[in-house]
Amino acid sequence: MKTSLGSISKHAARIKALELEIEIRTQMDSLPSYDCPSSAMTLSQVRQLVSCLTHESYSTIGKALDLLENNPAERETLRQRNQIQQKEGLPANGMYRIDLAHSPSLSAVNDVYASPLPPSKCTKNIMQQVQFTNGTPCEKALEQLWLKLTNLFALRLDARRALESLNLDVARQIHKQVALLLFSEEFVDGGHFDYSYAVRPSALSIKGKPSVNKVAMAKLEPIKTSDKIDDICDMTETLAGGLCEPTLSEGLKETDDRFHANQSGKGDKSSIAPLVEKEHQSPPAGDPWINEERTSDLAGKIDEETLSTLASVETGHCAQHPPECPEKYHIETILTAYEEEQIKLKALSSKKKVSNSFKKTLKRKLKRCRAVHELAGIVDVRKATRGLAIDVASLVISLPKDPLKTEHQALFEGHLRQEWPGINASLDDPIETLAQKTASDYFGSTSTIYNWASEFYDADGIQNNWKGIIKKKLDGQNSSEDRFAMNAEDLKMVFGHEVFSKGQLGINSRTKMACPYQYWLPLLTLFNAIRGNEGAQLYRDDIIYEFGIPYINVDDKREDQHIKNAHSRRKVPVHSLLIELGFLDYVNLFEPEQRIFPELSYHQNDKYFKNAGDWFSRTFKGAYSIKPEKKSFYSLRHNCVGFFKDHVGDKQPVVKALVGHTNASITFDTYGNKVALELLVEQLEKLEYDGFPEHIVPFFEGNYLRYHKEHREKYRAMKSESN
């Protein structure tokens, strides 16, 4: 916190600390409270927690619907609350619009989703309390549980929003979706795990809030696949009857007694039957909780999807091994096989160990392929038809860009990707959708994996129907339209900043040192066509003299160095302007094995360039003259490449070698090292830009040496020797 606040007084720090403590305590109080058991839990018992929450969610949403459907006065109260909120213009919090915590008459609506936190954080709060016995379950098992809980909370949040706005039709539809979740009591999750335990649904049906303690008390009874028909029929009767079962404590106690009797040999498995029959008896007459209209309405909601579930059980299909998707053709199986092979092949072709950069790129490809399958709604790769791929393409190109990192995060969090385009379209100011190239990369990643699978994994069963659907560029779109170069006004604004006009570098609030990357990286990119990370990762011994010509050796010879592709490996002479401004003197202050921008730390994304890129965006993004959303640090390289294209021709082999668009070794083999370097210098010295200031303060006339005592002494010694 201290780092983020910078230099402030102790009094201000105390006030800020108290504000944060109040905020944290408020959030802690709003979290769902689940008592953590003294003993650890099994994965099956955690799944039963999800079952408890599902039943409780169905009951809670149903009660809220009953309240608003049968009480015109409460509907009118809620309508008035909506009008007040619209006049004030501010929502209660990021999750819902109206604060109903102090409205007793509408408490049923508030209970549907009372937390100000998003669904994923509510899930995190529960999962962090659980300690698994017999080791931590596999990642896929945990991920599926996480998704189930998050999806359940997201449905409750959607129901709360629908009820607030009196959109009862939507609330009923959500109520129906929760009802359908009640049929998957085993939580087997597509055959990833092999658990076949279940607790009788009615024994875990609740009307109050479940606790982990109560769920942990539940005894697990193995059930046979043949029992599923009775289970689901019982569930159907239960739903039609309005979920009128015993309370959690009563149901668990009786189940507990029967189970112990079975375990001790005093009973048998069939002894559970009377309990089930008892639980599913018709409710007593006059039960105030039962509403005849909702009962008939709910009975009509057992739709074709439910009937197909029943049909699959009757024909003997087991949920653990769905016949329509054998494990061999599950997308996760294929992604795992693809990942393992690619890492092995990379290790064979590389002299050093497989880099984290390669693994990161591979993970991104797999992640994009998963996202495409989520949009398609399939896990069986054999179902990826050409028609389905084309339909998914329309969703991909309409996806909003990073919606979970925007002010609208609460609206998207907990929703499936298929819903994102619709949510985005409903906004007054929609989020920008994915760039054409990014959308193409999603399909390109998927196509690459399917192409591999159809050639090396299963040539007969898998086809690549994802190829060639989304192009990298729209018809008639030029590459220059992807990202704009800076115009004269922009260059004047950037290089007129005090970093260049006065040499006043920013000071790192943590180390209290000046940040020389702010000065040198933009100049290296504009006058040497050096990419951001190519400059940020430079070591002292990457600047080399040959034939009296200083040049930058762009390479990935070290573990923490990365280049875009093989063509990026090149020699770039240092432009004369940078020499005049003191770049070579600055470089000579470091030892051969030292990085010349040590203030930049390494990040998995954007490597050493991340902090530099963030600073540049914060400083200049809002000040560009035209199309500011299309301009960034990378625009400086577009200026350089664009100059060569307009004045020299970007097809010239020397120019292509200079900017890293072709294999530089060809140029050096053709002309020889000395001549090639001289030709590169000749081309670089042609660079000139309208709007670029005539005078920039030399680096060492600024404030750098004031903050670097060791370099100050070394620089003075260097200058005294030269004199």
Image (cartoon, helix red, strand yellow):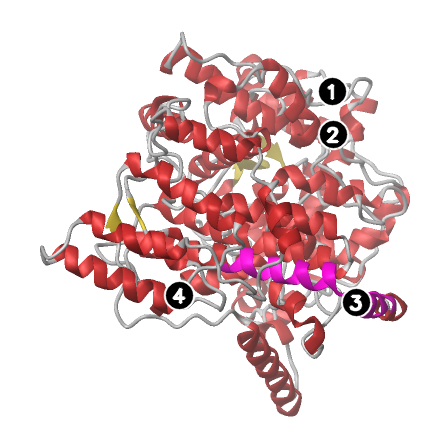
Asked if residue 501 is among those painted magenta in the image, a careful observer would answer: no
Residue 73, position as x, y percentages in the image: 80, 69
Instruction: Indicate the quadrant where residue 670 lies.
Output: top right
Q: Measured along the vertical axis of the image, is residue 407 above or below residue 664?
A: below
Q: Disc number at residue 248?
A: 4
Q: Measured along the vertical axis of the image, is residue 369 above or below residue 126?
A: above
Residue at numbered disc 2: 641
Q: Quadrant of the C terminus?
A: bottom right
Looking at marks 3 and 2 on the same chain, the residue that comes earlier in the sequence is marked by 3
Asked if residue 74 is among those painted magenta in the image, a careful observer would answer: yes
Looking at marks 4 and 3 on the same chain, the residue that comes earlier in the sequence is marked by 3
Q: Residues within 10 Å of mark 1 (few under 14, many from 20)?
A: some
Secondary structure type for disc 2: helix
- Looking at the image, residue 449 sits to the left or right of residue 406; the answer is left
Residue 304, position as x, y percentages in the image: 56, 31
Kind of residue at disc 4: Leu
Q: Disc number at residue 650?
A: 1
Q: CA distance from mark 3 to mark 1?
A: 66 Å
Looking at marks 4 and 2 on the same chain, the residue that comes earlier in the sequence is marked by 4
Residue 365 appears in the figure: no
Q: Residue at x 59, y 49 (%)?
A: 609
Looking at marks 3 and 1 on the same chain, the residue that comes earlier in the sequence is marked by 3
Magenta residues, start to end = 56-83
Secondary structure type for disc 3: helix
Residue 198 appears in the figure: yes
Q: Disc number at residue 78?
A: 3
Callout 1–callout 2 Cβ contact below 8 Å? yes
